[in-house]
Amino acid sequence: MSTIVTTSFKSIATSKLAAPALALALVIASPVTAFAQKSWKPDRPVEIIVGTDPGSGFDRTARLLQKIWQTTHLVEQPVTVVNKAGGFGAIGWVYMNQRGKSGNMVAIMSPLLLTNKITGNMDLSYRDVTPLALLEDEEIAFAVYADSPIKTGKDFIAKLQHDPTSVSVGVSGIGGQNHVALALVAQAASGIELPKIKVVSFAGSGDVTTAVIGGHVESTASPASTVGPQVQAGRMRAIGISSERRIGGALADVPTWREQGVDAVFSNWRGVIGPKGMTPEQTRYWDDIFAKTVETQEWKDEIQRSQLTGHYLPSHETGEFLSAENEKLIGVMNKLGLSKEASVPQAAR
């Protein structure tokens, strides 16, 4: 085919159909040219927006992305991490949506992207941004102070079923991911009145840990990476993990809730979103970047070191994941009395 096209240019040019035939020949001869004209990549520095202060888990994820992209040259433009703390992440997401129209700005997301909207903390919805990738799960561990009479997850559930006020549970923020994990476990166990559970809110997981170790609250639902060192030191006893399967490290022997007869799975997942209205070309670019990022050895090593679980989904599947998670969270937060949204039937969407 290419030989015929090449040797026919002269004769075609002298015919009445010269222009259209020549154009067709060029497309056939160079199919890559048309695609190249549609490809996109950042033409200015890239910003990763983090809705927390430096040092948080979200911030560490952003800085790992920055390091990998720069050292491997996956992203050709300079990459900076911008911290916009406040509003449980809302300030950062709103900032990105207002400023990132060129596609050079992305933001770290978590379940707070959904719960903030559900509780009325922000107007921005997951439908107002562009899902780009799901990256990892930070598993949530349930633990009690070392001398607690609660020895297992079944003991914990039995006490809550008998009297939901009989166990105090420390979490980092009402309506946050750890509170949600507690509610999903209690809901799956049945026979527990969710609004009556004695939940004690703290500013962060570090404060929760101090309170549990000191016996000021009996138990907690907290990040596994926070609970693990305390279990290893003998200051806490882990009684369950709300993950799909057991994790390694100091919590390797801790059974999942499913293993204990409670069908509840929930993690503090992390991913990346872009501003609303990103073009298909921009989304394809970031799909390629994230697919390559999670395959780097540095990414895999950090996932293992931090006791996270790799959970990569590309943009389209991330959008479906967010929709399903949103419905699940609306349901449980309605039962907690924290939701200002009603569940939307599937057929109505």
Image (tube, helix red, strand yellow):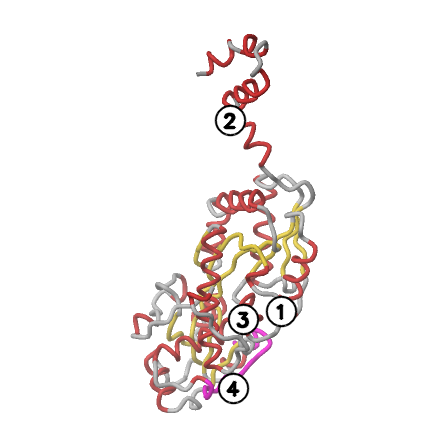
Above-or-below relation of 238 to 244:
below
Left or right of 332, for residue 282: right
Query: Foreground residue, 123 or 286?
Result: 123
The residues colored magenta run 195-209
> SS class of the residue under badge 2?
helix
* Helix, strand or loop under label 3: helix
User: 325 or 267: nearer the eye?
Assistant: 325
Q: Which residue is mark 4?
A: 216
Residue 208 visible in the displayed image: no
Question: Real-space Cα distance between discs 4 and 2?
Answer: 69 Å
The amino acid type of the residue labelled 4 equals His
- Sooner in the amino-acid sequence: mark 1 or mark 3: 3
Residue 306 higher or lower than 266, as above or below: above
Q: Which comes before the other along the chain, label 2 or label 3?
A: 2
Residue at mark 3: 115
Q: Earlier in the sequence, mark 4 or mark 2?
A: 2
Indicate whether 74 appears above or below 255: above
Amino acid marked by disc 3: Thr
